[in-house]
Amino acid sequence: MTLSDALDDLTPAHREVLVETYFKGRTVNEAAETLGIPSGTVRSRVFYALRSMKLALEERGVTA
């Protein structure tokens, strides 16, 4: 539930790259092909999405 709420806080672009790479287990290149964007964009979005996800989880009291 907490993870789902934190995902909802992300932008749609960040959410979709995390879903493709982490939840569906696709590589960066596979995610790029699926989403129709360059692989460098996928890598960049994953980086920023993970950073945003970390902050969203910390706001909910989840720590590493």
Image (tube, rainbow, N blue to C red):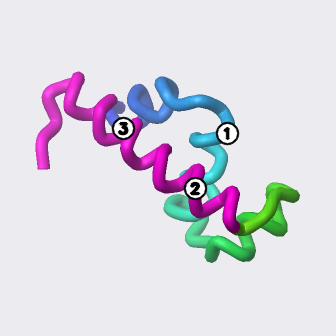
The reply to whether the magenta stretch includes residue 20 is no
The majority secondary structure of the magenta stretch comes to helix
**In the image, residue 26 lies at what x, y percent?**
63, 72
Q: Is residue 9 above or below residue 47?
A: above
Q: Position of residue 33 (x, y in %)?
A: 83, 68
Foreground pick, 5 / 30: 30
> Which percent across, then down, holds residue 14?
59, 42
Callout 2: 10 Å neighbours few (<14), some, many (20+)? few
Label 2 – label 1 distance at C-alpha:
11 Å
Q: Position of residue 8 (x, y in %)?
A: 51, 27
Q: Which residues are magenta?
A: 40-64
State which mark lies toward you, 3 or 2: 2
Residue type, label 1: Ala
Residue bearing the label numbered 1: 13
Q: Along the polypeptide, which appears first: circle 3 or circle 2? A: 3
Task: Report which residue position mark 3 lands on.
Answer: 3
Disc 2 target residue: 44
- At 79% from the left and 63% from the top, the residue drawn is 38
